[in-house]
Amino acid sequence: MTTYAERKAAKRARRPIYLTVQRLVDPRTGEEIGALVPAHPIDLRLLRERKFHVDREVRAELKQPRNVAFHRLAHALGHLLVDNVEAFRDLGAHEALKRVQRDAGVCCEPFEIDLGPLGKVQAMQARSLAFDEMDESEFRAFFEGITAYIGEHYAGVMLDEVRGEFWLMVNGEQA
């Protein structure tokens, strides 16, 4: 296997499997129970690829996914920046969010870069916004932090109509 193929396989092996809780009848007892079942056909396929089958014991870390509407709202905010603020014009919505995240220092990890004879510099690594990397409360802190930063640094360069749309988004009045 090539290095690329190995990395791709390793990433696929870490891919989360989404499950839903459904009421089913346990065939051994006839009792109605709540059971975790694959949420989508791709999740069923991932279970099969990992050789998870009926009656096999597995260890799992279960998390509830974030509110998808809130996630979409953040990306709509990214689009608003790209479409209306010159500093973001050449970026995609996600890249705009990541730039504001780093600039605001919200949900970022500081690290040091050694430039050899030039010395060391501090930099910020923005944490992933992926559903499985950041829970709902962390995402809320991220959203509140970037909107405060945008309000302070960029709202003044927005047209009145766009600024009004921004504040509606911030206050949760528009998705």
Image: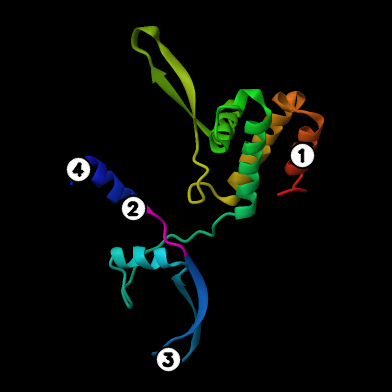
Q: Earlier in the sequence, mark 3 or mark 1?
A: 3
Circle on res. 29:
3
Q: Mark on residue 165?
A: 1
In the image, is residue 166 above or below residue 6?
A: above
Which amino acid is tagged 3?
Thr
Front residue of 89/76: it is 89
Picture residue at 50% right of the left edge, 59% below the top: 63
Residue segment shown in magenta: 12-18
Q: Which residue is mark 4?
A: 2
Cβ atoms under marks 2 and 4 closer than 8 Å: no
> Label 3 vs label 4: CA separation?
49 Å
Estimate the x, y position of residue 9 in percent, counting from the top left. Answer: 28, 51
- Residue at 37 percent across and 13 percent down: it is 115
Q: Mark 1 is on which residue type?
A: Glu
For numbered disc 3, what is the local secondary structure?
loop
The quarter of the displayed image where residue 166 is located: top right
In front of the other: label 3 or label 1?
1
Labels 2 and 4: the sequence-earlier one: 4
Check the image and report above or below for 93 versus 10: above
The extreme left residue here reads 1
Q: Secondary structure at mark 2?
A: helix
Q: Earlier in the sequence, mark 1 or mark 2?
A: 2
Evaluate whether residue 46 shows in this view. Answer: yes
Q: Relative to 10, does residue 23 appear above or below in the rendering?
A: below
What is the CA distance from the residue labelled 2 to the residue labelled 3? 36 Å
